[in-house]
Image: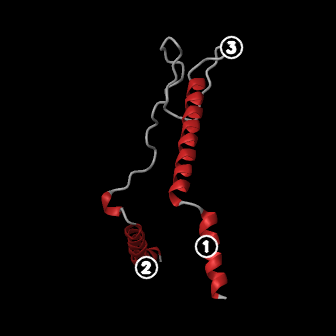
Amino acid sequence: MRALHIEWLDQYERERGDAAALQLKADLFMHEFDKVVVHERKKKEEVLSVPDEDGWVTVGRRGGKKTTDAKGTTVGVATAKLPNTKKERSKADFYRFQLREERRNRTCSACHLLPLVVDRQI
């Protein structure tokens, strides 16, 4: 039984191959892959800045990027920054629990005044 185990390990080591050779093969593959990716990216960028036969320029998903034609004039539209419409909170009410406590205090103070108001109406 022990001999089969050792034989199996030897066979596994032979089939697996050299780690350095495997690393070299992986590095070569990744180098070629990186070349292809860079080539495709350059190809896409060239299409974005060149007008077609009708004079239209392809606009990508990049928001603020300006495209220029062969003469160097800007063809794309620059997007203006919109003002921030989000309500600004004060520094004192930054945390959620502070907002909850403030709301609770307002309702409690209104509850304390309620009997006074009812007594005046009667």
Instruction: Using the image as rendered, state which of residue 48 and residue 66 is in the foreground.
Output: 48
Q: Which residue is mark 1?
A: 10
User: Where 50 sits versus 101, above or below?
Assistant: above
Task: Specify which label sits upstream in the sequence, 2 or 1.
Answer: 1
Q: Nearer the viewer, mark 2 or mark 1?
A: 1
Residue 40: x %, y % from top left: 60, 33
At mark 2, the secondary structure is: helix
Counting labels gives: 3
Q: Residue 61's quadrant in the figure?
A: top right
Q: Secondary structure at mark 3?
A: loop
The colour scheme is secondary structure
Q: Residue at x 56, y 50 (%)?
A: 25
Give the alpha-carbon distance from disc 3 to disc 1, as whole Å. Answer: 68 Å
What mark, if any, has residue 115 been given in the picture? 2
- Near mark 1 (Cα within 10 A), the count class, few <14, some 14-19 or many ≥20, is few
Residue at the outermost bottom position: 1
Task: Out of 25 and 73, give the one closest to the viewer.
Answer: 25
Q: Which residue is mark 3?
A: 54
Q: Are marks 3 and 1 in contact (CB under 8 Å)?
A: no
- Under mark 1, the amino acid is Asp
* Residue drawn at the location 53% of the way across and 16% of the way down: 69
